[in-house]
Amino acid sequence: MKYPILESAIIKYGIPKKQLAEELGLTQAGISRKFVGKSNFTLEEACYIADRLGSTVDELFREISKIQPANSRLDAQEIHDLTLKAIRDIREAEQLQSDKT
């Protein structure tokens, strides 16, 4: 999984990858390749997803390698902690957005 924060966000919002693929005009195999890093999301796709989730491209598409040094391995607890932090950050952003309206 190349984008754990994105992965946790779509799970939180209950958006199946198949549905996201359809919204982006991709096949299910195509979106799977993007999630594992075999192909890249276009800027347009990344912006659409960020908008759909009420987040930012920066936050959702942060890679583990940018969170930890490349020579460091994350254990299951660290991945879990990062996922929970991402969910808290998304909820905080949602609350800020809600407070603005």
Image (cartoon, rainbow, N blue to C red):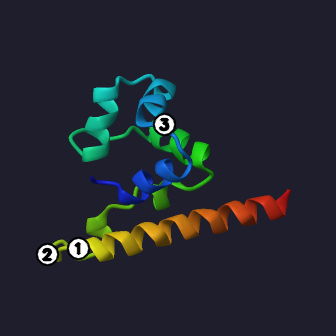
Residue denoted by label 3: 44
Residue 49, position as x, y percentages in the image: 52, 42
Within 10 Å of the Cα at label 2, are there few (<14), some (14-19), or many (20+) other Cα atoms? few
* The furthest residue to the left: 71
Quadrant assignment, res 68: bottom left
Name the residue type under label 2.
Answer: Asn
Residue sitting at x 25%, y 37%: 33
Residue 11, position as x, y percentages in the image: 47, 50
Name the residue type under label 1.
Answer: Leu
Residue sitting at x 44%, y 56%: 8
Q: Which label was assigned to residue 71?
A: 2
**As drawn, 46 above or below 98:** above
For the C terminus, which image quadrant? bottom right
Which dot, 2 or 3, sits closer to the camera? 2
Name the residue type under label 3.
Answer: Glu
Residue denoted by label 1: 74
Which dot, 1 or 2, sits closer to the camera? 1
Q: Which label was assigned to residue 61?
A: none
**As drawn, 33 above or below 81:** above
**Gap in angstroms between the C-alphas marked 1 and 3:** 30 Å
Residue sitting at x 51%, y 27%: 23
Element marked by disc 3: helix
Upstream in sequence: badge 2 or badge 3: 3
**As drawn, 59 above or below 57:** below
